[in-house]
C-alpha cells in the first residue's frame, strides 16, 4: 500500500491512492490492538460507525477473522448513533445494518454489542443516554473510536453547534444530513428528524480515534476540519486537540487540501510537467489573465517565484502550457479510421448525461459505438412510474386481446405491494423487474436518439447491484468475468469509463473498480485498448487534468439534451439527485459543458460553444 503523511494539517493525516487501501490500513491498526490485548487476556473496546465509509474496514476485519484467525470473542463494541424513532429490525436501522454488515460474520458475543436504542419512549431517552455513558466507563473506556465525517462536519450525529463537552443525547438532524441520507430511505420525507448519538466529549475520551473520509464529496469539509481553526460549526474540528487522532483519506477526499491544490504555498515543489501545468493554469484563472498574458509579477506575487527561477520566464511557461492545453482539443476522439468503441454506463443514463456529445460525434464519424449498461438502475424509479407502466401493460393487452388475465393479475400484485409498502421499504421482485424494464427501454430510446441501434447495447445487470436497496454487495468475480467476456466479444479499440470519485451512492466507483480489474485481466491475455475516463453528473475534471476535450456544437448539445430527456423516469425530479444540487441532470450536463468551454476561453484558447472532457486511465 502506497501512502504518505501530509503537511499543513492540524490533525495527523495519511492519504492512500484508493479507499480500499485506506480501509485496509485502518483494519491493520485495529487488528494489531486486538491481537495484543488477546495475548494479554484483556478485552478490546471499539467505538463503531455506520454508513458507507467504514464498510471496507468491516469487510477486512471479517476477512482477518475467517482467514487469519483474528479472534473477536473478547471485543466489546459501542456504536456511535441510531436514528430515532426506529425499530431494531427496520431495514434502515443502524442496529440491523451493523449485524448484517459486520457482527453476524464474526464471533463477537451478542452481550458485548452496544447500539443506541431507537425504540425507547421519549421520556426514557435521557436516562438511557446516561446509562450508555456509564456502560462505556465500566469497561474502561473506548480503546479505538472509528469515525466518518458528514458533509456538515458532523461526527456521529453531532451537528453544527454541538459543543466540545456534549455527551450522549437526543439530537435533531441537520437538513443537509437528512438530505444526504435520503437515498437510503428512498426519499427525504422518510428520514427521521432525530437521532441518539454519542457526544463530542464522549468521542474525545477514546484513547485513539481513527476518522476516515472517502470521495470528492467529502473533500471540502475535510479541508475545513483539518486546515482551519476548530469551531463548534464543524464538530470534526474538535479532533484537532485530541492526543491520538489519525485521519485516513483516499486521494479524492484529500483533493481540496492545500498540499494538493496549491502545494507551492506550503512546501517546496518538485516541478514535474503535470505540476507546472497545474500551477500555471491555476495562476491564469486566479489573476484573470490568459496564459499568454501572464507576467513575471503574477508568478512572484502568488508563491511561484521558484517556478520561473527554475523553469523559465513567464512568457516561456505561458506559451508551453498554452500549447499543451491546445493539444488536448480533439475533434476526432477515436481517430480517422473506423473503430469499435465501447462506452460503459454505470446507470442507464450516465452515458448520455456525461458524454452524449462525444457519442453523437463518434457515431457521425462512422465508428461502431456499443454501450454497456452495467446496472439496472431500478431502485431509482418512483413507484408512480411503476404503477403507470403496469396500467399501460394491462390496457395494451386488453385492447389487443393479449393474455389479459395474466396482466390483470400482475397489475393487482403490483398495486397491492406498493400500497402496503412502508416508507423506505424495499420493493418486491415484480416491482423491481418492472422498474428495471422502465430504465432499459428508456436507455434504448436515448441511445437511438444518439444514432445507436438496440443491437449495439449490452444490459449487463451486474450482480453487486442486485440488492434492491442502496447498500450494495462487493464486486462479484463473475461481474469481472462478464466484463472480460464483453471485451473478448467486441475487441474494442477504445473504452470509456465513468471515473467518478464523487458519486454519493458508490455505484460509479464500484463499476469502475470492476472494469479496471477486467482490463488488467484482459491485458494479461494479450488484449489491449485505450481507456478514457469521463465524469458523472456531479463533477468535472480540473482544467490541468484534462487530456482530451471534445468540442460540442449547439446542435449537438441540443441532441444530447434530447437523449437525456428520453430517460423520463429521471426527468423533472430524479429519485437520487445527489448532494444538495437539485437541478435536473440535463441542466447539470449543459452547464458543465458550457463552463468547461469557458475555462478554455479564459485561458486564451480558441472559443468553443461547449466541451466534454476526458482523462486517460494510466492503469494504476
Image: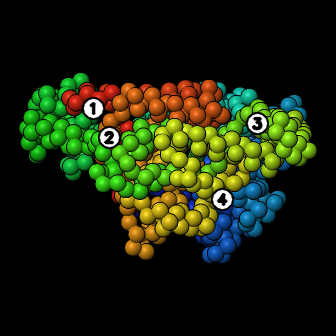
Q: Is residue 461 left or right of residue 339?
A: right
Callout 3: SS: helix
Which residue is pictured at 80% across the width and 42% down the height?
425
**Dot 3 corresponds to which residue?**
389
Mark identifier at residue 600: 1
For label 3, the crowd category at 10 Å Cα-Cα, with few meaning under 14, some 14 to 19 and many 20 or more, is some
Gap between marks 3 and 4 measured at Cα: 25 Å
Whether residue 202 appears in this view of the structure is: no
Q: Observer-nearest residue: 193 or 449?
A: 449
Q: Farthest residue in the top direction?
A: 288
Q: Are marks 1 and 2 in contact (CB under 8 Å)?
A: yes
Say which label, 3 or 2, has the lower sequence index. 3
The kind of secondary structure element at disc 4 is: helix
Q: CA distance from mark 3 to mark 2?
A: 40 Å
Quarter of the image containing the N terminus? bottom left
For label 4, the residue is 463
Residue 449 visible? The answer is yes
- Residue density around tag 2, few if under 14, some if 14–19, many if 20 or more, within 10 Å: many
For the residue pair 550 and 558, the one nearer the viewer reads as: 558
Q: Nearer the viewer, residue 454 or 266?
A: 454
Mark-to-mark CA distance, 4 and 1: 41 Å
Camera-near label (3 vs 2) is 3
Amino acid at each position: 500500500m502506497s501512502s504518505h503523511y501530509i503537511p499543513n494539517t492540524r490533525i495527523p493525516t495519511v492519504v492512500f491512492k484508493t479507499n480500499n487501501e485506506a480501509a485496509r490500513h485502518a483494519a491493520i491498526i485495529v487488528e494489531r490492538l486486538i491481537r495484543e490485548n488477546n495475548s494479554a487476556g484483556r478485552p478490546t473496546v471499539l467505538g463503531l460507525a455506520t454508513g458507507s465509509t467504514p464498510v471496507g474496514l468491516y469487510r477486512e476485519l471479517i476477512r482477518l477473522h475467517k482467514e487469519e484467525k483474528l479472534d473477536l470473542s473478547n471485543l466489546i463494541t459501542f456504536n456511535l448513533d441510531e436514528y430515532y424513532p426506529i425499530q431494531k429490525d427496520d431495514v434502515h436501522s443502524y442496529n440491523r445494518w451493523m449485524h448484517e454488515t459486520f457482527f453476524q460474520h464474526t464471533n463477537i458475543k451478542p452481550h458485548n454489542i452496544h447500539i443506541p436504542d431507537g425504540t425507547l419512549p421519549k421520556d426514557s431517552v435521557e436516562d438511557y443516554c446516561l446509562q450508555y455513558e456509564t456502560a462505556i466507563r465500566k469497561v474502561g473506556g473506548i480503546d479505538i473510536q472509528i469515525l466518518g465525517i458528514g458533509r456538515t462536519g458532523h461526527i456521529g450525529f453531532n451537528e453544527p453547534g454541538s459543543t466540545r463537552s456534549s455527551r450522549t443525547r437526543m439530537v435533531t438532524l441537520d437538513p443537509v444530513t437528512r438530505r444526504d441520507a435520503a437515498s437510503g430511505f428512498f426519499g427525504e420525507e422518510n428520514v427521521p428528524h432525530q437521532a441518539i448519538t454519542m457526544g463530542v466529549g464522549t468521542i474525545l475520551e477514546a484513547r485513539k480515534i481513527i476518522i476516515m473520509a472517502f470521495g470528492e464529496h467529502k473533500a471540502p469539509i475535510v479541508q475545513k476540519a483539518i486546515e482551519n481553526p476548530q469551531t463548534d460549526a464543524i464538530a470534526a474540528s474538535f479532533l484537532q486537540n485530541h492526543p491520538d487522532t489519525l485521519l485516513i483519506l483516499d486521494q479524492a477526499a484529500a483533493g481540496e487540501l492545500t498540499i494538493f491544490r496549491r502545494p507551492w504555498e506550503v512546501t517546496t515543489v518538485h516541478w514535474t510537467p503535470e505540476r507546472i501545468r497545474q500551477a500555471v493554469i491555476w495562476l491564469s484563472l486566479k489573476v484573470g489573465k490568459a496564459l499568454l498574458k501572464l507576467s513575471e509579477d503574477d508568478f512572484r506575487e502568488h508563491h511561484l517565484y521558484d517556478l520561473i527561477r527554475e523553469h523559465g520566464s513567464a512568457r516561456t511557461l505561458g506559451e508551453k502550457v498554452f500549447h499543451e492545453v491546445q493539444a488536448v482539443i480533439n475533434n476526432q476522439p477515436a481517430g480517422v479510421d473506423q473503430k469499435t468503441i465501447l462506452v460503459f454506463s454505470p446507470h442507464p443514463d450516465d452515458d448520455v448525461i456525461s458524454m452524449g456529445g462525444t457519442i453523437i460525434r463518434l457515431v457521425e464519424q462512422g465508428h461502431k459505438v456499443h454501450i454497456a449498461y452495467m446496472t439496472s438502475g431500478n431502485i431509482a424509479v418512483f413507484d408512480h412510474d411503476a404503477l403507470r407502466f403496469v396500467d399501460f401493460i394491462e390496457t395494451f393487452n386488453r385492447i389487443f386481446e393479449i393474455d389479459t388475465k395474466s396482466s390483470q393479475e400482475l397489475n393487482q400484485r403490483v398495486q397491492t405491494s406498493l400500497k402496503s409498502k412502508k416508507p423506505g421499504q424495499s420493493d418486491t421482485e415484480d416491482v423491481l423487474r418492472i422498474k428495471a424494464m422502465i430504465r432499459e427501454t428508456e436507455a434504448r430510446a436515448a441511445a437511438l436518439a444518439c444514432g445507436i441501434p438496440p443491437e449495439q447495447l449490452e444490459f449487463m445487470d451486474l450482480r453487486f447491484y442486485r440488492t434492491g436497496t442502496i447498500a450494495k454487495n462487493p464486486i462479484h468475480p463473475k461481474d469481472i468475468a462478464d466484463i472480460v467476456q464483453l471485451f473478448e466479444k467486441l475487441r474494442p479499440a477504445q473504452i470509456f469509463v465513468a471515473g467518478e470519485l464523487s458519486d454519493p451512492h458508490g455505484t460509479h466507483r464500484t463499476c469502475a473498480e470492476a472494469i479496471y480489474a477486467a482490463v488488467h485481466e484482459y491485458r494479461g491475455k494479450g488484449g489491449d485498448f485505450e481507456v478514457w475516463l469521463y465524469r458523472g453528473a456531479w463533477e468535472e475534471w480540473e482544467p490541468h487534468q484534462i487530456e482530451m476535450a471534445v468540442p460540442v456544437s449547439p446542435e449537438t448539445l441540443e441532441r444530447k439534451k434530447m437523449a437525456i430527456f428520453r430517460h423520463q423516469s429521471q426527468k423533472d425530479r430524479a429519485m437520487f439527485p445527489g448532494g444538495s444540487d437539485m437541478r435536473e441532470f440535463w441542466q447539470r450536463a449543459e452547464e458543465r459543458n458550457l463552463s468547461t468551454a469557458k475555462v478554455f476561453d479564459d485561458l486564451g484558447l480558441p472559443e468553443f460553444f461547449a466541451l466534454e472532457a476526458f482523462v486517460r486511465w494510466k492503469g494504476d
